[in-house]
């Protein structure tokens, strides 16, 4: 099941001595655990809301960097750089969300002699411009949906694009991500509204009002390919993940591998991902995301230039520690495996347990976790930044924990995930979670048959008054 990661020790003159973790919650704990195994000291930065969090308790040193609002703490670059300088950290790991895809932050790190554990800033700039990277990778040979050539300068141009490619169309923020700044239009009247609303949201959330259009696929599968690329030109893919079960275009359940893909399509997706990495000059861990239509035809969607929330399912089927590989690559080391070394074994499923009420339009339900008893047993992993008695704050993303299971077959993995969810006791006064919905989704006939798609959850829930944009997305740069 495992793939060698180079043998020998991770420690040596090229590897970092101290890493500052510029994030919070489960991903901060996750990074700190790998650092401890590698013999690397850690610094956890935290807001006043997270001073008693597990990430702060787990790290070797802590630095308080500001009040709860993310823009005054986890996204406040001067405080993070000063914390790194004061503690002597020689690298910063940004996790996901927050500053993880901010090329200016990566440049500032370099100016202060601090390594940024992620892609080079120029790569992030291209990958972060969804319209630009779409054109670049189309020229590299990846299939793309019919849509705009760049970003329409005005509504009239957007209407002309839609008339040319055919309705329905999807309007996306060029600088967007995480399911935000997206709207679907089935008629010219809907496009006028969607264009105005999406440009306004994009300006508010991402600082750029540019949008682009693509033909909309209403019943597609969302499939992404995990990459590792070093600074010496080597690139490998680690297979694909299926992320089709989503609410408001944010993921609920992910699995690896993706069910229902032919060996030929699986190989093509891996080849496309490596082609994309080489076209971008990519370095580090990242993903190339695709939509697969009901006929099995793939089209490129976007590149995510960071570690992703769902990376554990890839770890479970490959035996690799992706955070360890990120750190080694950022330290200048060569990949210790080739494509032929990659072996996928069994099936893994991840369920995101959020403090949200699915019956109330996925309204966040912050509060004290009076009960937090995670499951155990064979092939069962729980990544979390919380413990019993902790408060889920209202200032950040609502993720409480990630339940990840592995089994030899998909049916066994589904059964194991359901068993573990049934064991997972979590909540408190006013703290509803997604656990009941996750069990419902695992039992859904379309999921059981591997025929689920990106609209299934919305079709099941249809919340009244729901919106693609939440106030906490604007406040926090929510996890994606």
Image (cartoon, helix red, strand yellow):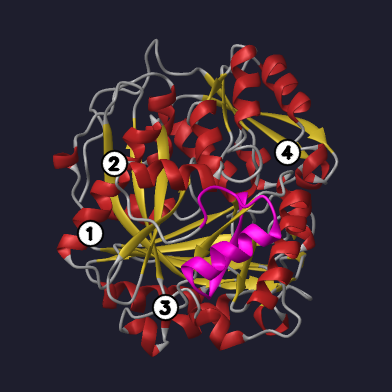
Where does the image place residue 439, in percent across and percent down from the top left? 49, 81
Depth check: give the residue in front, 290 or 420: 290
Ranked by sequence position, the earlier of labels 3 and 2 is 2
Instruction: Tell me if label 4 and label 1 are in contact, CB under 8 Å.
Output: no
| Magenta highlight on residue 296 | no
Tell me the residue that label 4 is attached to: 74
Secondary element under disc 2, as helix, strand or loop, is helix
Where does the image place residue 356, in percent across and percent down from the top left? 68, 72
Tell me the residue that label 2 is attached to: 274
Residue 289 lies, with reference to residue 283, above or below; the image says: below
Residue ID at (30%, 21%):
232
Q: Quarter-wise, where is residue 281 in the image? A: top left
> What quarter of the picture does the C terminus occupy?
bottom right
Residue ID at (34%, 83%):
448
Q: Which of marks 4 and 3 is in front?
A: 4
Tell me the residue that label 1 is attached to: 266
Secondary element under disc 3, as helix, strand or loop, is helix
Left/right placement of residue 260 relative to residue 228 reads left
| Magenta highlight on residue 168 | yes
Distance, label 4 to label 2, CA atoms, is 32 Å
Ranked by sequence position, the earlier of labels 1 and 2 is 1
Residue ID at (47%, 82%):
441
Instruction: Tell me if label 3 and label 1 are in contact, CB under 8 Å.
Output: no
Image: magenta residue range: 148-175
């Amino acid at each position: 099941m495992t793939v060698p990661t180079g043998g020998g020790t991770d420690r040596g003159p090229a590897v970092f001595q101290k890493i500052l973790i510029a994030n919070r919650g489960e991903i901060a704990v996750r990074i700190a655990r790998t650092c401890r195994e590698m013999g690397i000291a850690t610094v956890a930065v935290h807001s006043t809301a997270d001073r008693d969090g597990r990430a702060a308790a787990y790290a070797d040193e802590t630095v308080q960097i500001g009040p709860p609002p993310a823009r005054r703490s986890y996204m406040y670059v001067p405080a993070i750089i000063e914390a790194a300088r004061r503690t002597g950290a020689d690298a910063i790991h940004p996790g996901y969300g927050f500053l993880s895809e901010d090329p200016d932050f990566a440049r500032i790190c370099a100016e202060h002699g601090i390594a940024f554990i992620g892609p080079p800033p120029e790569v992030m700039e291209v990958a972060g411009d969804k319209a630009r990277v779409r054109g670049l990778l189309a020229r590299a040979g990846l299939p793309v949906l019919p849509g705009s050539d760049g970003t329409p300068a005005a509504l009239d141009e957007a209407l002309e694009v839609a008339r040319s490619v055919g309705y329905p169309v999807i309007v996306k923020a060029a600088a967007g991500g995480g399911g935000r700044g997206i709207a679907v239009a089935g008629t010219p009247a809907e496009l006028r509204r969607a264009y105005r609303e999406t440009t306004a949201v994009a300006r508010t959330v991402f600082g750029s009002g540019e949008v682009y259009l693509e033909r909309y696929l209403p019943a597609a599968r969302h499939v992404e390919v995990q990459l590792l690329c070093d600074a010496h030109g080597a690139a490998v893919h680690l297979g694909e993940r299926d992320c089709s079960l989503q609410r408001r275009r944010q993921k609920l359940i992910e699995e690896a591998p993706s069910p229902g893909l032919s060996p030929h399509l699986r190989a093509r997706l891996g080849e496309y991902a490596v082609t994309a990495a080489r076209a971008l000059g990519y370095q580090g861990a990242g993903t190339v995301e695709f939509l697969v239509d009901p006929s099995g035809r793939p089209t490129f969607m976007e590149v995510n230039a960071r570690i992703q929330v769902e990376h554990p399912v890839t770890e479970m089927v490959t035996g690799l520690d992706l955070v360890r590989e990120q750190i080694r690559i950022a330290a200048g080391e060569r990949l210790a495996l080739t494509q032929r070394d990659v072996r996928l074994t069994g099936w893994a499923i991840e369920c995101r347990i959020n403090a949200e009420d699915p019956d109330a339009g996925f309204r966040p339900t912050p509060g004290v976790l009076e009960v937090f008893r995670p499951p155990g047993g064979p092939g069962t992993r729980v990544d979390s930044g919380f413990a019993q008695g902790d408060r889920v704050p209202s200032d950040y993303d609502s993720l409480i924990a990630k339940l990840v299971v592995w089994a030899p077959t998909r049916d066994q993995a589904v059964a194991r995930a359901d068993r573990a969810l049934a064991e997972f006791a979590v909540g408190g006064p006013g703290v509803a979670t997604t656990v009941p919905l996750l069990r419902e989704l695992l039992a859904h006939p379309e999921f059981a048959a591997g025929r689920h798609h990106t609209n299934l959850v919305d079709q099941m829930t249809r919340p009244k008054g729901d919106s693609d944009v939440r106030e906490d997305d604007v406040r926090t740069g929510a996890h994606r």
